[in-house]
Each structure stands twice: as structure tokens, then as C-alpha cells.
Image (cartoon, helix red, strand yellow):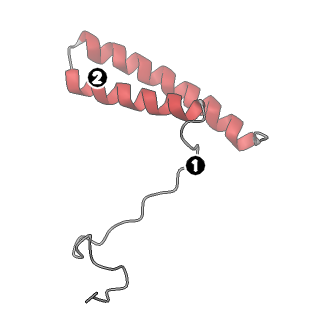
Amino acid sequence: MTMRRDDGMKLAELDYIQQMLLELCRISRRRDLGFLTYLIEMAYSEASDMKEGMRPLNPKPAQPRDPLRPASSPANGAQKL
């Protein structure tokens, strides 16, 4: 699999994001901000997974769900008998 130029730029940007997250994590730990530290660590881990190919660089966005339609109803609105 060949790497496109865009992917190379994204990897460089992920490196930068990781550096910033690492610094934010250090600050939040010093201030004993437990939950914020956890969230920053999760973001750092996500960026690592993307760089290592464990997550796609271009994930497809989740389809918004109609909050008025129950999750179990068919998408076309027809009711099953």
C-alpha cells in the first residue's frame, strides 16, 4: 500500500497533535485534574492508533440518528408485523 501525500501530511499533523496532547496531559496531571487527564490520554491513544494504522486516518462519520424514531424501528418507517 502506498502512502499518499495527504496521508503524510496527516501523519505530521498527528505528530504535532500528540506533542500538544502530551504537554496538556503533563499540565493536567500537575494540577491533579483526574478526569481531564483521562480524556487527554484517550485522545493521545487515539492519535497513536491512527499513526500505527490501527484506526483509519479518514473514518466515515457516523450517520445521525433520528431522536424521534426508536432505535429498533425500520429506517424506511414501515412497521414489521
Q: Could you tell me which residue is drawn at 55 percent across and 26 percent down?
A: 16
Q: Which residue is mark 2?
A: 37
Q: Could you tell me which residue is drawn at 63 percent across and 32 percent down?
A: 11
Measured as percent of width and height from the top left, residue 35 is found at 22, 27
Which quadrant of the figure has residue 74?
Answer: bottom left
Judging depth in this view, the residue of 39 and 13 nearest the camera is: 39
Which quadrant of the figure has residue 40?
Answer: top left
| Element under disc 2 | helix
Rendered view: 12 above or below 58: above
Extreme-top residue of the structure = 30
Could you tell me how far apart the alpha carbons at marks 2 and 1 are, in whole angstroms? 26 Å
Which quadrant of the figure has residue 79?
Answer: bottom left
Quadrant containing the C terminus in the rendered view: bottom left
Q: What's under tag 1, amino acid-wise? A: Asn
Q: Could you tell me which residue is drawn at 24 percent across and 76 percent down?
A: 69
Quadrant containing the N terminus in the rendered view: top right
Measured as percent of width and height from the top left, residue 56 is found at 57, 44
Q: Which residue is mark 1?
A: 58
Classify residue 80 as left or right of residue 60.
left
Rendered view: 74 above or below 42: below
**Callout 1 crowding tier (Cα within 10 Å): few <14, some 14–19, many ≥20:** few
Whether residues under marks 2 and 1 lie with C-beta atoms below 8 angstroms apart, the answer is no
Classify residue 50 as left or right of residue 75.
right
Q: Could you tell me which residue is drawn at 28 percent across and 22 percent down?
A: 37
Which of the two discs, 2 and 1, labels the residue nearer the N terminus? 2
Number of numbered tags placed on the structure image? 2
Classify residue 79 as left or right of residue 7.
left
Judging depth in this view, the residue of 36 and 60 nearest the camera is: 60
Measured as percent of width and height from the top left, residue 10 is found at 63, 37
Classify residue 54 as left or right of residue 41.
right
Rendered view: 1 above or below 63: above
Measured as percent of width and height from the top left, residue 19 is found at 50, 20
